[in-house]
Amino acid sequence: MQPACLIVLNTSHLFLSLDVLPRVTCPNHPDSILVEDYRAGDMICSECGLVVGDRVIDVGSEWRTFSNDKATKDPSRVGDTQNPLLSDGDLSTMIGKGTGAASFDEFGNSKYQNRRTMSSSDRAMMNAFKEITNMADRINLPRNIVDRTNNLFKQVYEQKSLKGRSNDAIASACLYIACRQEGVPRTFKEICAVSRISKKEIGRCFKLILKALETSVDLITTGDFMSRFCSNLGLPKQVQMAATHIARKAVELDLVPGRSPISVAAAAIYMASQASSEKRTQKEIGDIAGVADVTIRQSYRLIYPRAPDLFPADFKFDTPVDKLPQL
């Protein structure tokens, strides 16, 4: 009988073909499932109890950790995950806070400090990455948006093409660009609401970043915001489809020249909701869309004269077209 081979793989980093690796199996029951005894470090056949492999390396966590622990002592002896965006991969050593008398000199100052373990550029990027993650969490953006934003910020920061602009403003603009590039655009007001930067400053950084990176973003359309706005307003699917159809036809017929897609979408939602049983006021729609009531009224007045041509043919009217509000 050939000696058993023990293969320990970290599948998160290695992608090897299973055909070229010997498979650890029980000689008596090749198809049985092997049970791993972490305490003893053995791999045991579930059919006959034969110890197929011993001295198995436990790749699990050494200690159980809890994110809400307030204790200053951390029993973990491993570092944080590697961050390829930082110069040294964020593998620098961090010295814990001293508690004994040997940790301090005769003047009470700590003997061991972390001041020089991270460069100033890495520290600035780390702070920006934390701010980006916080902003994304507040508006429920997925991880791929955060990763793209971090990459954009790193490119801009290393080019040093936006000197004089705050890192928070650059991070907010990068988040706005990443959302548009990933097909889930957010408005400037939505980004401004979760950041500490004004809308005007985010807009300036947005234009400068596009120019510095020589990149572009797709034009936003009314359909990019329609499903989210209608969902936040609690409108049924029929009203959402009608509003989408109204906005698209209004653009095709060139009824709203020079109007932003957000204001057109808000006006279309207002018209569709007023024609249905699920009516919403201009104030309610404006709060969700981030536009003023007067902006909704101006766009609504442009599309109202052609209202009969804008609704889909199968729409069930609760309020007839000729009874819609005339603002």
Image (cartoon, rainbow, N blue to C red):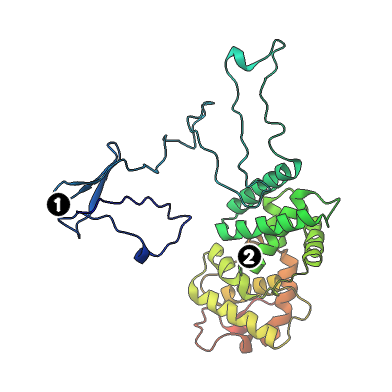
Where disc 2 sits, the SS reads helix
Please state which of the two labelled residues, at mark 1 or mark 2, is closer to the viewer. 1
* Residue 261 sits in quarter: bottom right
Q: Residues within 10 Å of mark 1 (few under 14, many from 20)?
A: some
Query: In the image, what residue type sits under mark 1?
Result: Glu
User: Residue reaching furthest top?
Assistant: 106
Q: Residue at x 51, y 78 (%)?
A: 318
Q: Which residue is mark 1?
A: 47
Position of residue 45 relative to residue 111, above or below, is: below
Query: In the image, what residue type sits under mark 2?
Result: Ile
Position of residue 175 relative to residue 6, above or below, is: below
Q: Residues within 10 Å of mark 2 (few under 14, many from 20)?
A: many
Position of residue 248 relative to residue 187, above or below, is: below
Q: Quadrant of the C terminus?
A: bottom right
Residues 94 and 320: in front is 94
Please state the horizontal and vertical placement of residue 197, each as a whole percent of the image: 76, 51
Q: Residue at x 71, y 65 (%)?
A: 293
Pointer 1 and pointer 2: residues touching (CB < 8 Å)? no
Which sits earlier in the primary sequence, circle 1 or circle 2? 1
Q: Which residue is mark 2?
A: 285
Please state the horizontal and vertical placement of residue 271, each as a whole percent of the image: 62, 76
Question: Going by the image, does 152 lie left or right of 313?
Answer: right
Q: Residue at x 68, y 87 (%)?
A: 252
Where disc 1 sits, the SS reads loop
Please state the horizontal and vertical placement of residue 240, each as a whole percent of the image: 54, 74
Residues 90 and 180: in front is 90
Residue 275 visible, this angle: yes
Residues 108 and 41: in front is 41
Residues 278 and 138: in front is 138
Q: Quadrant of the N terminus?
A: bottom left
